[in-house]
Structures are given as structure tokens and as C-alpha cells.
Image (spheres, helix red, strand yellow):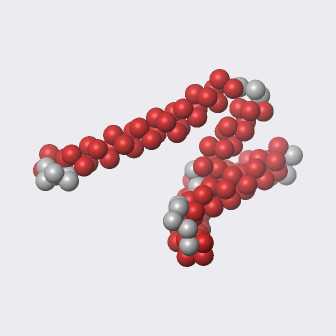
Amino acid sequence: MSNLALVALFGAIGSAFRFVLIQATPKISYVNFPIGTVVVNLIGSFLIGIVAALFERQLLSNEIKTFIVFGFLGGFTTFSAFTNEIFNMLKIGNYFNIMIYLFFSIIVSLFLFYIGYKIVKILVWKNHFYLLL
């Protein structure tokens, strides 16, 4: 099986785990908050830390790291990759790039989400769906 197929398989498994946790967590916690997403992101960050340490100690091959990080954890949560990249920049003291990365990853992403939302709201929700065709 090719590496791409294995990454896709692991990603599908991670996505399924994410779905189950996000669905189950609010039923357990009874909190009016996206607790499922927080739990998934925290677990993903913890797991990526384990994988990073194992890889640094050469206890995991590059292929296995790829299947776990890009596959399983990529499907489970993208926040884990974000956390890993911030951690790698912290290790080398690259604080300027951390600030840029945080700005684009959080502020600009939220802004672009809002723009996309508004475009759809204006074009589709106001019966102008034909403009999209």
C-alpha cells in the first residue's frame, strides 16, 4: 500500500474518532460550550507531543510519524499540527515567526471565515443563489 493511501486511511480513522468524541462529549458534560472540540484539540496536542518526542529519540521512523501526524492526527485535529509547529519555533527561539504564525492562523483565519460567511449570506440567503451558478 502506498504512503498516500496509508495517510488517507489513518486520516479516515482519526476523523471517525474526532466525530465520535465531538458527538459524545456534550452528552457527558452538559456544558453549553464546544467542549468536544476543545477535548479533541487537547488530546491531539498531547499525542503530537508524544510522537514528536518519540521521533526525536529515533524511536519512530519517518513513515510511521507521517502516518500518525499527517494521517491520524491530521484527521483527528489540525490543532495538533499547529501546536507542534509553534513548539518547534519555541525550541529555536523564533518568537517573531511565532507571532506572525499566531496572527495568520487565528486572526486572519477568523477574518476570512467571516468574509466567506458574509458572501454566502449576501448571495445565497438573500435569494441570489443564481449568481453563484
Q: Is residue 127 visible?
A: yes
**In the picture shown, does residue 110 fall above or below 45?**
above
**In the picture shown, does residue 97 fall above or below 62?**
above
132 left or right of 99 in image: left
| Quadrant location of the N terminus in the rendered image | bottom right
Total labels: the figure holds 0
**In the picture shown, does residue 126 fall above or below 101?**
below
- Where residue 83 sits: x, y (%)? 66, 44
Query: In this view, which residue lies farthest toward the top?
Result: 96
Q: Residue at coordinates 58% horizontally, 55% vertically from top-left?
A: 77
Q: Residue at coordinates 26% horizontally, 48% vertically from top-left?
A: 120
Q: Residue at coordinates 57% horizontally, 64% vertically from top-left?
A: 36
- Where residue 27 sits: x, y (%)? 55, 76
Question: In which quadrant of the rendered view does residue 119 lie?
Answer: top left
Give whichever of 101, 57 is nearer the camera.
Answer: 101
- Where residue 66 sits: x, y (%)? 67, 50
**In the picture shown, does residue 70 fall above or below 92?**
below
Question: In which quadrant of the rendered view does residue 31 lie?
Answer: bottom right
Q: Is residue 15 visible?
A: no
Q: Residue at coordinates 63% horizontally, 61% vertically from top-left?
A: 39
- Where residue 56 sits: x, y (%)? 82, 43
Question: In which quadrant of the rendered view does residue 37 lie?
Answer: bottom right
